[in-house]
Image (cartoon, helix red, strand yellow):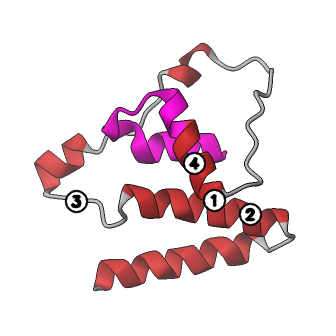
């Protein structure tokens, strides 16, 4: 799930897959480890990307959360979940932080 989120977050910046992994690992800290899951995935899984260009062009939408902050939030969420934090509570906290950024 983290990899999908990170790829969706930074796909528009066209970083190589290895650069994406390195950037997330750097933000994760010394305990970062990468392990390929080895399972079979649908053929389109490698091509799925989030592209916000239409929303930017047609609606004037602009991202509120900068790339580096989004990566920090991903690492923060998964680290807290690994420590036994409630996924629901973690998600709601980040949603409230995001809402505060949007209101600013």
Viewer-closest of 69 and 54: 69
**Badge 2: few (under 14), some or many (20 or more) residues near its Cα, within 10 Å?**
some
- The Cα atoms of the two marked residues, 4 and 2, are separated by 12 Å
Which residue lies most toward the front here?
30
Sequence-first disc among 3 and 4: 4
User: Which of pointers 3 and 1 indicates the residue nearer the eye?
Assistant: 1
**Badge 4: few (under 14), some or many (20 or more) residues near its Cα, within 10 Å?**
many
User: Which of pointers 3 and 4 indicates the residue nearer the eye?
Assistant: 4
CB under 8 Å between discs 1 and 4: yes
- The Cα atoms of the two marked residues, 1 and 4, are separated by 7 Å
- Residue occupied by mark 1: 75
- Residue occupied by mark 2: 79
Viewer-closest of 53 and 70: 70
- Residue occupied by mark 3: 62
Sequence-first disc among 1 and 4: 4
Task: Name the residue at 41% across, 43% down.
Answer: 10
Task: Name the residue at 30% across, 84% down.
Answer: 103
- The Cα atoms of the two marked residues, 3 and 4, are separated by 23 Å
- Residue occupied by mark 4: 24
CB under 8 Å between discs 1 and 2: yes
**With respect to residue 95, does 11 lie above or below?**
above
């Amino acid at each position: 799930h983290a990899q999908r989120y990170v790829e969706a977050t930074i796909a528009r910046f066209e970083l190589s897959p290895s650069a994406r992994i390195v950037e997330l690992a750097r933000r994760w800290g010394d305990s970062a480890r990468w392990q390929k899951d080895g399972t079979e995935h649908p053929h389109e899984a490698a091509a799925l990307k989030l592209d916000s260009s239409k929303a930017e062009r047609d609606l004037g939408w602009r991202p509120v959360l900068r790339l580096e902050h989004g990566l920090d939030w991903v690492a923060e969420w998964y680290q807290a979940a690994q420590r036994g934090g409630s996924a629901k509570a973690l998600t709601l906290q980040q949603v409230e932080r995001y809402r505060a950024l949007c209101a600013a």
